Image: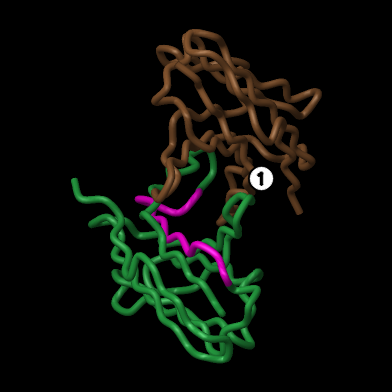
Amino acid sequence: EAGVAQSPRYKIIEKRQSVAFWCNPISGHATLYWYQQILGQGPKLLIQFQNNGVVDDSQLPKDRFSAERLKGVDSTLKIQPAKLEDSAVYLCASSLDPPRQGAQQVQFFGPGTRLTVL
Amino acid sequence: GENVEQHPSTLSVQEGDSAVIKCTYSDSASNYFPWYKQELGKGPQLIIDIRSNVGEKKDQRIAVTLNKTAKHFSLHITETQPEDSAVYFCAASKNSGYSTLTFGKGTMLLVSP
């Protein structure tokens, strides 16, 4: 079974530029997550999709970050304009179903995209 | 919201020794506690998880214990090997609705040959 795919693996941009990341979840996984992992910290959820609908974007800085999941499969995360503090690894994860009573679903993570903002 | 504290931040052991990583959580409603291993340049990978209806779970050299009264859980690795060297994250969530994982800050484990 193929894992979660992400691209690019690395990206270096100047502040105020824009950048986009792409994620392809495991086939059949309904739930997709984007996390931000700053160096030395654990992943922090930015946004969660159930199929192509957003179920949690409470920690997404909506003035500069946006995300979409067209057709409930692939997803893109965009930052515009980027700030120095956006330097981090952006992780995509997927799970078979959304968390539901008594059945928290295992999340499978992709390799991440390392973003450096200069 | 949930807050997860993880200790120690770094842990160095000799090959063959045991390693213990501890986490505490703040939300008494949390009832799912996974542990992830992250190797350099890779995404986190689930190594073991525990739900609140059990106090301990074991998988070969890895075990997790949970104390719901004290709101803490621990990862135990026995007979450590150099390939166990990585960053380990604990996390907590509730098994309801669209509740999400809250991660600790991670523990860098270094196993020396």
Callout 1 crowding tier (Cα within 10 Å): few <14, some 14–19, many ≥20:
many
- Above or below for A33 versus B47: below
Which of the 4 image quarters holds residue A58? Answer: bottom right
Q: Main secondary structure of the magenta part?
A: strand
Q: Which chain: brown?
A: B
Q: Report x, y in % for residue A4.
A: 30, 56
Q: Report x, y in % for residue A22.
A: 34, 73
> Please, what is the three-letter code of the amino acid marked with disc 1?
Lys
Q: Report x, y in % for residue B43.
A: 42, 49
* Residue positioned 44% across, 37% down in the render: B46
**What span is in magenta?**
A87-99
The residue labelled by disc 1 is B105
Q: Report x, y in % for residue A67.
A: 46, 79
Which of the 4 image quarters holds residue A98? Answer: bottom left
Quarter of the picture containing the N terminus of chain B is bottom right
- Above or below for A14 versus A87: below
The colour with which the image depicts chain A is: green
- Above or below for B37 versus A43: above
Residue closest to the eye, B103 or A115: A115
Magenta span includes A89: yes
Residue closest to the eye, A66 or B68: A66
* Residue positioned 60% across, 37% down in the render: B90
SS assignment at label 1: loop
* Residue positioned 64% across, 35% down in the render: B31
Quarter of the picture containing the C terminus of chain B is top left
